[in-house]
Amino acid sequence: MNLKSVALIALGVGLLGARAMAADLVDQHIATKKVTPQEAEVWKVIDEYWGRSGCCGHANIVDSGKYLDYVSDDALVWAPNTAGVESKSASKMWTKAMEGFGGTRVQYELYPQSMVIHDNVAIAFYRMRVLSVSKETPNKQNVSQGRYVDVLVRDRPGAMWKYLTYTRGD
């Protein structure tokens, strides 16, 4: 049995931490996929942003506003259920306004499809599945699925990747 087979079996039964296989698995929330070290940097940022509310073992970076560190100052995003394109400041305003109304993300998984990196621009294509519960019906699980295209940029090699834009489809 080769090492990859052993690793997949161990992961399946929960005996091996996801971080131990950084070359094959970026995080437990990202489906197994062989990635380059540069792609792993981008997936790490995407994963941390998906877990920004404190979901699934991640630090809550929404309450402190640190989630904005993951967004480029000139970002423009057309997020699901929004009337139009939002700037970074509009995203901050709407996140604050929606604090008391949202549900709780219980689990998510990202399924990488493809990634293109040119210099300091990365475009990630992936599918997602999210399990959440709402405040109104906390005993009812809501599952959503969809696909995303994220565009991340960095100021220079070695700098943190940040969101420039993303879009979702079902």
Image (tube, rainbow, N blue to C red):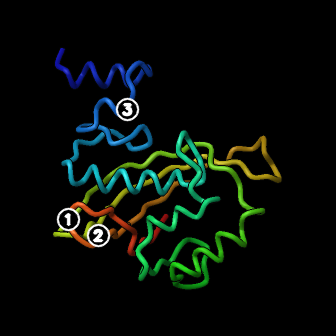
Look at label 2 and name its amino acid. Answer: Arg
Q: Residue 154 carries which label?
A: 2
Q: Which residue is drawn at 58% across and 64% down?
A: 65
- x then y, percent, for residue 144: 57, 54
Look at label 3 and name its amino acid. Answer: Ala
- x then y, percent, for residue 106: 62, 43
Mark 1 or mark 3: name the one nearer the start of the chain: 3
The answer to the question of whether label 1 and label 2 lie on touching residues, with beta carbons closer than 8 A, is yes
Q: Residue 157 carries which label?
A: 1
Q: Residue at x 33, y 68 (%)?
A: 152
Question: Neighbour class for label 3 at 10 Å: few (<14), some, many (≥20)?
Answer: some
- x then y, percent, for residue 143: 61, 49
Tag 2's secondary structure?
loop
Q: In this view, does 166 lie to the left or right of 94?
A: left
Q: Name the residue under label 3.
A: 18
Q: In this view, does 30 lie to the left or right of 7?
A: right
Look at label 1 and name its amino acid. Answer: Pro
User: In the figure, 169 relative to 55: above or below?
Assistant: below
Question: Neighbour class for label 2 at 10 Å: few (<14), some, many (≥20)?
Answer: some
Image quarter of the N terminus: top left
